[in-house]
Amino acid sequence: MAEKKNTTIAITQTTNDRLELLCGTLNITKKDFIEAAVSYFQRNGIDPRTDAREESNQAIADQLKIISAQLQSNREDTQLTKRQNETLFGLVKGVNDGLQAVISKQDEQQQATQLIVQQTKKKRHWWQRKGKDDEN
């Protein structure tokens, strides 16, 4: 493995004091801090000469717009699903009501059929008895 060669950078004493304070707070070396900072700026596409808060705020605002659009879309989907469910419920209720009416008619027809059968048996019995009476 090739050894990485270090170099020296010049910063003001005030900046060095601030860097040492940050490194002490974070418990890292100045070398690790500089490497992490360079990676961070590069990875996130941040220009360290600008106010990162402004860029961060804009990124947050952009994300909020995306989230808001997604929520609106979800709300519309939910409303559509609710209307579809209401329509489906209405159809199911209509089918159920229709089936109940058919069942009720079938019950009425069955009762009428039983009544006809009973009356027919009575008449047959009456005719059978009448025939026996006529023979005697």
Image (cartoon, rainbow, N blue to C red):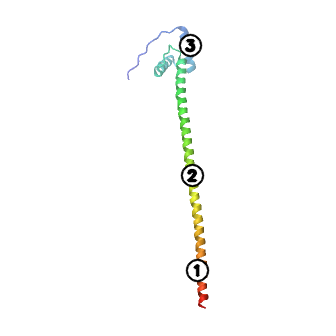
Local crowd size for mark 3, using a 10 Å CA cut-off: few (<14), some (14–19), many (≥20): few
Q: Which residue is mark 2?
A: 94
Q: Using the numbered discs, state the Cα–Cα distance from disc 1 to disc 2 in whole angstroms.
A: 45 Å
Mark closer to the observer (2, 3): 2
State the residue at coordinates (41%, 19%): 4
Under mark 1, the amino acid is Arg
Mark closer to the observer (1, 2): 1
Q: Which residue is mark 1?
A: 124
Secondary structure at numbered mark 2: helix
Q: Can you tell which quarter of the image residue 67 is in? A: top right
Local crowd size for mark 2, using a 10 Å CA cut-off: few (<14), some (14–19), many (≥20): few
- Residue 48, above or below 125: above
Residue 59: x and y in percent read: 52, 23
State the residue at coordinates (59%, 82%): 127
> Which numbered disc, 2 or 3, marks the residue that appears first in the sequence?
3
Marking on residue 18: 3
Tell me the quadrant of the picture where the C terminus can be found: bottom right
Secondary structure at numbered mark 3: helix
> Which numbered disc, 1 or 3, marks the residue that appears first in the sequence?
3
Under mark 3, the amino acid is Arg
